[in-house]
Image (cartoon, rainbow, N blue to C red):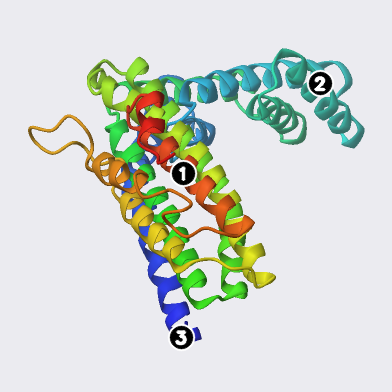
Amino acid sequence: MPRTASLTVAARRRARTGWQRWQGSWWQVLQCGLGAGVAWTLARALWDQAYPVFACVAVIVCLGVQNNARLRRVAELGTGVTVGVLLGTGVVQVIGRGAWQICLIVVTAMLIARFLDSGGLLTNQAALQATFIVAFPPQPGGGSARWLDAMTGVVVALAIAALLPSDPRRDVRARASAFSGQLADLLDDAAEAVRARDAEAAAAVLERARGTQRELDAWSQSVSAALEVQRLSPLRRGGRTEIHEQQRLQSGVDRATRNARVALRRVATALQYDEQLPSSIAGVMHSLAASVRSLGQRPYPGETAPPSVATLEELAAQLGPRTLGAESLSATVVVAQLRSVVVDLLQAQGVPPAEAHRLLPR
């Protein structure tokens, strides 16, 4: 592939991924902005704070741009601030302010926080709040003013998360679609490398495949976040079935991706050492890529199975080593791994394991 065309394809894919990220986070961004303004207003009205900055900070930290682990972030932030404020106030009253006092308070606060919980946010907030109290000049209300700011932000964050939740299925669907497209691109590019017998291109595909775990983990976190939103908000109790289906899909695609990486590694090795790979393997990879692109789509009206199930079942019937002319060891290994990928994807969409294996040629 010419370098200019390759750069164009890469730019198009990056733009598509960025647009999908924007679509999946715009509502969370608005929530953070609204929450910061509400927390500022409430803290000034309730506690007569001139500059309740930390009320806004607490909202942004608790809500963030992702729905996942919001309850845990609230708990960690509240506990961390409480520990830091209490410890910092005590240190100032007993030993005063200064450089060595800051060293002592940071170490002590972090050790206490780590004893209480493993959360990084809790540990950081305990140390930061204690440091603020020791390092900054005294302010009206002392440490209690900062604690009230933080608790105001925490309450506002909880209220927004419960009363103004985004549809958690939207982000999960976007993650599923984005990763399906990424995996399909890998399979298509690997197929082209096989057709062209291009070892360098195959190695580049393998390198990209090794970096896909981060996106898979983000998809898993999105599913967990969706389940948390449904528990937290009474307005989002519907759609639980779809979320559980997405959870099963993500788990199956994770297994399929691991098997696909093994296949791609064998393809790269075979091309590097000029081993025989029949062109039929490239055709199978293209067909598999087409099926992968439709993963996560809902069944058509009147149908019970997603559209990709039918195409995967047809593909499974073609995955016989003899049918594909897989005579070398590398070709046999690639076909075996593609068989595993197809089985994983069928099971991820509700096909029983015995039925998925039965479809494969003996």
Is 307 left or right of 357, judged from the image as shown? left
The residue lying at 41 percent from left, 42 percent from top is 342
Residue position marked by numbered label 2 in the rendering: 111
187 relative to 362, above or below? below
Distance Cα–Cα, label 1 vs label 3: 35 Å
- Mark 2 vs 1, N-terminal side: 2
Front in this rendered view, residue 326 or 57: 326
- Mark 3 vs 2, N-terminal side: 3
User: In which quarter of the view is residue 289 placed?
Assistant: bottom left
User: In which quarter of the view is residue 19 placed?
Assistant: bottom left
**Which mark lies nearer to you, 1 or 3?**
1
User: Mark 1 near mark 3, Cβ–Cβ under 8 Å?
Assistant: no
Q: Amino acid at mark 3?
A: Thr
Q: Secondary structure at mark 1?
A: helix
Distance Cα–Cα, label 2 vs label 1: 51 Å
**Which mark lies nearer to you, 2 or 1?**
1
Asked if residue 28 shows in the view, the reply is yes
Distance Cα–Cα, label 3 vs label 2: 54 Å
312 relative to 238, above or below? below
Residue position marked by numbered label 3 in the rendering: 4
Residue position marked by numbered label 1 in the rendering: 339
Q: Secondary structure at mark 3?
A: helix
**Which mark lies nearer to you, 3 or 2?**
3
Asked if residue 44 shows in the view, the reply is no
At which x and y percent is residue 79?
A: 62, 17
Is 284 left or right of 340, judged from the image as shown? left
283 relative to 299, above or below? below
**In the image, farthest residue toward the right:** 100
Q: Secondary structure at mark 2?
A: helix
Q: Amino acid at mark 1?
A: Arg
